[in-house]
Image (cartoon, grey):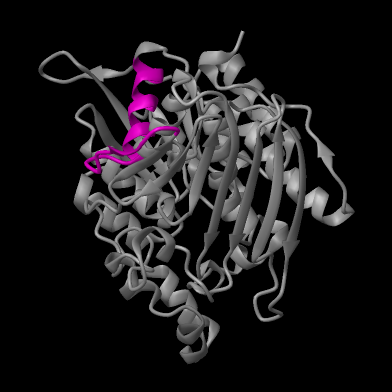
Amino acid sequence: MASVGGDDKGAPTVHVGIVGLGGGASDMIPAFVQHPHIALTAAADIDKGQLEKFHSEFQGETYLSAEALCDNPHVDVVYIATPNQFHVEHALIALEKGKHVLVEKPMTLTLDDADVMIQTAKRQGVQLMVNVKHSFDPHIRQIREIVQSGELGRLRMLHYWYFADWLYRPRTPEELNPSLGGGVTWRQGPHQFDILRTIGGGVVRSVRAMTGTWDESRPVVGCHAAFLEFEDGTAATAVYSGYDHFNSRELTFGVGEARPPSEASVYAQGRKTLRQLASGEAETALKQAQRYGGASRAARAPRRSASWVLGGPLVVTFEHGDVRLTPSGLCVYGDEETRNIPVSTETDGRHGIVDQLYEAVVNGRPPSADGPWGKATLEVLLAVFASARERREIFLAHQVPTPNERA
């Protein structure tokens, strides 16, 4: 493993290499850049033009393969941001080279592959983390603190519903291929289920769910509705529709605020935009614009993940109150009063997970989004598919509590 260096003040610097300069990397690069003790050192991609942009901006080394990047002795952490079907391959290359790994969600497409990644990281003595960045959003962390404090009594229910135009935004062919981890449930479910597990303490007992594939022109799951029961009896519902009719941001921000201005120029009006495209190549070109250095992305410009988190509604019910997300924080409806808890928007979930990555690598502090946690969220996701296919309740066997509550 590369040795972590230090800056002129003695604070250790962690050097990060990125494998895959797509939309996920574009979202994360600003958080890496804004951390005072993280340096972007290298990138690997099959697009030479994007590698040139990366080198121009960060003066980092560039490679056409994950293997070549992982041979760089100056890289401490490899951030895997390639398409879902490549996560396990690229993560294992990095882990076997003794690199710490931050892998995009979902960590893999199978539980067996998740086990191999976890075991390899343990054998190599390195950190393995999964980038469930929305679970690190300050709003979500604040709700979890309310749960742990007991100030509103026991947690009873969680309801997280999201309606958007995911299916009709520009997509790559693999995003529309279910066998490659495409569709709403594979792409957005990990965030939604991970948020519910984070608030609820982690251990889901069972799942009953349905999924829908309702548009032959986009032959992939476009929605799901799931009921999750935690081991302690807490109930949760997760609903996601990407079919571009109603946008549930209206329930948080009001009519007319269905999409953040920063996204409006990229996604325009979902179905309408796709109907106007002349070919699949035109859709691919729009998608390309969202990759690192694309016309729709500024590498150092922050894109607040809170806009996704606040696209709920998310309502959390306790014995003595309800809590819901608001644009400025949280609204708490208690037995005696209603009050607002402001939540800072100076940072978002990306910054939270980057901070935890740094602490794990430099100080050996166990991360909450580690391999077993990522595997448990993957198990929920796979249970949603199994329950929808078999039309029955699926019981889970690989759940873990939040790290600070593990034995």
Q: Which residues are magenta?
A: 335-362
Q: Quadrant of the C terminus?
A: top right
Residue found at x 50% / y 19%: 126
Q: Is residue 92 visible?
A: no
Residue 353 against residue 236 in the figure, above or below:
above
Q: Position of residue 66 (x, y in %)?
A: 49, 42
Is residue 358 part of the magenta span, yes or no?
A: yes
Q: In the current view of this chain or complex, which residue is farthest to the front? A: 336
Q: Nearer the viewer, residue 107 or 196?
A: 196
Q: As drawn, is 324 to the left or to the right of 85? A: left
Q: How many marks?
A: 0
Q: Position of residue 14 (x, y in %)?
A: 30, 25
Residue found at x 56% / y 16%: 124
Q: Quadrant of residue 231?
A: top right
Q: Position of residue 150 (x, y in %)?
A: 48, 20
Q: In the current view of this chain or complex, which residue is farthest to the left? A: 8
Q: As drawn, is 314 to the left or to the right of 294? A: right
Q: Nearer the viewer, residue 384 or 67?
A: 384
Q: Nearer the viewer, residue 149 or 165?
A: 149
Is residue 404 part of the magenta span, yes or no?
A: no
Residue found at x 50% / y 70%: 165
Q: Quadrant of the N terminus?
A: top left
Residue 94 against residue 60 in the figure, above or below:
above
Q: Nearer the viewer, residue 75 or 245?
A: 245
Q: Position of residue 388 (x, y in %)?
A: 80, 55
Q: As drawn, is 272 to the left or to the right of 34? A: right
